[in-house]
Image (tube, rainbow, N blue to C red):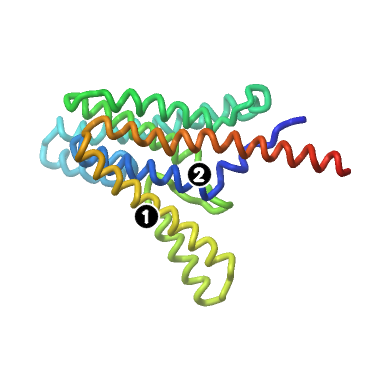
Amino acid sequence: MKRAHGQMSESLLLGAMLAMAGGFFDAYTYLCRGKVFANAQTGNIVLFGANIAEGNWLRAAEYFLPILAFALGVVAAEIVKRRYKKRQSDINIHWRQIVVLVEIVLLIAAAFLPQSMNTTVNIMISFICAMQVESFRKVRGSAFATTMCTGNLRSGTEQLVIWAQTGDRNAIRKTRNYYSIILFFILGGAIGALTTARIGEKALLLTCIPLSLVFTVMFVEEEHTLEAEETAGKER
């Protein structure tokens, strides 16, 4: 029997774990790796332009390279999706799990790079964040981002207004989901700040914990789905 894929990738649990990692990434790169934003590139784009205007070409390059890496991360995630999505039943792994594995490997490597290689680390983490945000776009059917909060804040507040005006239970459910993701992002940022202050560069290794959980739980859900299908088939 063919496996069903993709259900768990939109669960609130996975969204929360990914958001926690996302918050950690931002705190880590800003506090430990030269005050560069790894997740959302808006800040880097603004600082890139500001440094260009001031003639600080070397500093401008430090902001431009993560921007470029983010774009390449989106390309990489799409390549993985196109190459492995139709082969998931054959390889017994979801294409999103491949993305998470790539994240974990790159994070382990980045954690052992010294301060003299901060630009390289920021490039790697920007690449990772792009792969993550491109691969995990929804939580319970609603569009989300797990490496930035602006869109989630807008959407959650919008759903809150809809609920207040109409009493729509679906709107308040979406509100809870959006704000839950934001809270986990904040939690990840707080953990990132505290652990980076104490153990420095290698604090990044802690992000492998929620990402490993994401990888594992997707297998659990796949097995659960398969068992449910087999039970339903026997009942029929």
Q: How far from the left and from the top, in percent, is residue 135?
A: 50, 38
C-alpha gap between disc 2 and disc 1: 19 Å
Label 2 is placed on what type of residue?
Answer: Leu
Q: How far from the left and from the top, in percent, is residue 82?
A: 57, 28
Quarter of the rendering containing residue 129: top left
Quarter of the rendering containing residue 70: top left
- Name the residue that disc number 1 marks: 150
In this rendering, would 13 be left or right of 43?
Answer: right
Q: Which mark is residue 14?
A: 2
Q: Does the residue at mark 2 contact the one at mark 1 (Cβ under 8 Å)?
A: no
Q: Which sits earlier in the primary sequence, circle 2 or circle 1?
A: 2
Label 1 is placed on what type of residue?
Answer: Thr
Whether 171 is drawn above or below 85: the answer is below
Residue name at image x 53 percent, y 31 percent: 97
Residue name at image x 49 percent, y 66 percent: 159
Q: Nearer the viewer, mark 2 or mark 1?
A: 2
Residue name at image x 23 percent, y 38 percent: 196
Q: Can residue 45 be seen in this snapshot?
A: no
